[in-house]
C-alpha cells in the first residue's frame, strides 16, 4: 500500500508511530492546510513521509499513491472520500464513515463501479479480543441484555460551556457524543447482532449538540443500551448477558482491551488476546492485506456492516431531533 494521508490532527499523530510497524505500508503523501504546514513538515521529517501537500488535487494527481486515508473532521469525510474515488484511489475512511447513510450509499456505488476498495477505519471490528467475543457468544445461551458505556469527560467541554465551540461539539462539523464515542458502541453491537428493529436516542442536548446520550437498540430477543458521554464520566465497560452466562468487556469498545467470561456457577475466564498494543494496528494490517489481494468480498461485507451502522445513526439523530452538517 502506498498511502496518502489526509490531515495532521490528533488521529494522524497517533497513527503515524503505529504504521511504521507495518513495513508494507509506504507513507507517500501527507495533506495539510496551509496553517498547519509547519506541523506537517515536522511529521514528514519524523516519519519519513515522501511529500507534504497543501493542495488536495496535487496529492490525488500523484500516480504513486494508490490509497487515501481520510483522517479529517467528520463533516469532510464524504467530500474528500468521493474525490479520492473519482481519482481512482482506494479509500480508508475514519469513523464515522459519513454524516448520513445516503452519503455512504453514494460512495459505495462509486467505489464498486470502479472496482476500488472503500472501507471504514473502525478499530474494534479487527481486534482479536472482539473476534473471540463473537465466537464465544454461543457460550452465553440465549442473549438477553447488552450494555455498553463509553463515557469520557472531554477536555473541550469546559471550553464549550464557556462559549468556545471546537469541532468535537460543533454540529456543523459532525461533532457530539453519538458520533465520537457512542459510534464505537454501535459498531460493537451491530457487529455482533446485525441491524436492530428499533432505534431510540435520548440525549442531553446543549446548543444543538448531544453532549451525552443513551441509545436504545431493540432486537427480537435482545435489548441493548449504549451510553456515550463527553460531559460526564463513569467506569468504562460493556456487558453481554445471556441465559447461560455473561461477558464483561474491560475498557472502551474502541480498544476491547480484555474481557472476562462468567458462567452461572461463578467460574471466570480472563482473556486478553490482542496481539498489538496499539488499537489501530490490527485494522491496518487487515487493510494492507485487503488492498494487496484486492479482496472485494471482504470489502463488500464490511461495507454492509458500515451501512447498517449508518442506518442506526440516521434513526438515532432523527429520534433526538438532531441535525449534523
Image (spheres, helix red, strand yellow):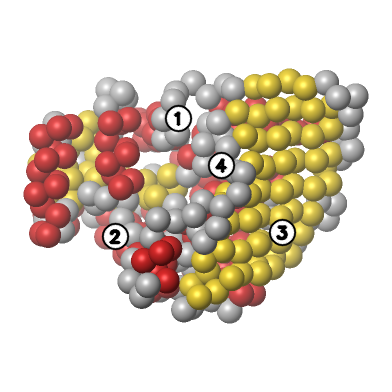
Whether residue 270 is situated above or below residue 146 in the rendered picture? above
Answer with mark 4 or mark 3, whichever residue precedes in sequence. Answer: 3
Residue 76: give its label. none
Give the residue displayed 55% in from the left and 31% down from the top.
257
The crowd level at tag 1 (other Cα within 10 Å; few <14, some 14-19, many 20+) is some
Q: In front: mark 4 or mark 2?
A: 4
Find numbered disc 4 in the image and state the secondary structure of the residue it sits on: loop
- Asked if the residue at tag 1 contacts the one at tag 4, i.e. Cβ–Cβ closer than 8 Å, the answer is no
Answer with mark 3 or mark 2, whichever residue precedes in sequence. Answer: 2
The front one of 126 and 62 is 126
Whether residue 208 is situated above or below residue 246 in the rendered picture? below
- CA–CA distance in space, label 3 to label 2: 31 Å
Q: Quadrant of the N terminus?
A: top left
The crowd level at tag 3 (other Cα within 10 Å; few <14, some 14-19, many 20+) is many
In x, y percent, where is residue 72?
A: 31, 56
Give the residue displayed 63% in from the left and 56% down from the top.
227
Answer with mark 1 or mark 2, whichever residue precedes in sequence. Answer: 2
**Residue corresponding to mark 3:** 217
In x, y percent, where is residue 151?
A: 56, 52
Residue 282: give its label. 1
Q: Is residue 84 left or right of residue 115?
A: left
Find numbered disc 3 in the image and state the secondary structure of the residue it sits on: strand
Amino acid at each position: 500500500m502506498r498511502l496518502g494521508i489526509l490531515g495532521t490532527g490528533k488521529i494522524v499523530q497517533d497513527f503515524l508511530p503505529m504504521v511504521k510497524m507495518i513495513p508494507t505500508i509506504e507513507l507517500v503523501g501527507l495533506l495539510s492546510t496551509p496553517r498547519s504546514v509547519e506541523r506537517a513538515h515536522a511529521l514528514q521529517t519524523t516519519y519519513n513521509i515522501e511529500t507534504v501537500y497543501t493542495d488536495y488535487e496535487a496529492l490525488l494527481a500523484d500516480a504513486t499513491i494508490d490509497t487515501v486515508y481520510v483522517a479529517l473532521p467528520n463533516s469532510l469525510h464524504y467530500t474528500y472520500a468521493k474525490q479520492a474515488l473519482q481519482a481512482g484511489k482506494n479509500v480508508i475512511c475514519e469513523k464515522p464513515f459519513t454524516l448520513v447513510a445516503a452519503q455512504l450509499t453514494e460512495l459505495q456505488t462509486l467505489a464498486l463501479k470502479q472496482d476500488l476498495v472503500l472501507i471504514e477505519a473502525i478499530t474494534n471490528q479487527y481486534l482479536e479480543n472482539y473476534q473471540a467475543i463473537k465466537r464465544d457468544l454461543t457460550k452465553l445461551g440465549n442473549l438477553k441484555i447488552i450494555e455498553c458505556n463509553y463515557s469520557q469527560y472531554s477536555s473541550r467541554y469546559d471550553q464549550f460551556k464557556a462559549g468556545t465551540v471546537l469541532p468535537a461539539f460543533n454540529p456543523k462539523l459532525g461533532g457530539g457524543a453519538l458520533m465520537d464515542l457512542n459510534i464505537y458502541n454501535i459498531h460493537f453491537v451491530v457487529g455482533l447482532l446485525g441491524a436492530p428493529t428499533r432505534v431510540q436516542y435520548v440525549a442531553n442536548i446543549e446548543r444543538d449538540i448531544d453532549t451525552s446520550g443513551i441509545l436504545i437498540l431493540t432486537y427480537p430477543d435482545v435489548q441493548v443500551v449504549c451510553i456515550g458521554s463527553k460531559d460526564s464520566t463513569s467506569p468504562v465497560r460493556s456487558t453481554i448477558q445471556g441465559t447461560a452466562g455473561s461477558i464483561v468487556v474491560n475498557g472502551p469498545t474502541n480498544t476491547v482491551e480484555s474481557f472476562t467470561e462468567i458462567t452461572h456457577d461463578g467460574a471466570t475466564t480472563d482473556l486478553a488476546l490482542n496481539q498489538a498494543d496499539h488499537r489501530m494496528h490490527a485494522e491496518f494490517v487487515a487493510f494492507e492485506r485487503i488492498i494487496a489481494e484486492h479482496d472485494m468480498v471482504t470489502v463488500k461485507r464490511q461495507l454492509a456492516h458500515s451501512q447498517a451502522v449508518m442506518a442506526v445513526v440516521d434513526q438515532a439523530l432523527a429520534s433526538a431531533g438532531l441535525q449534523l452538517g
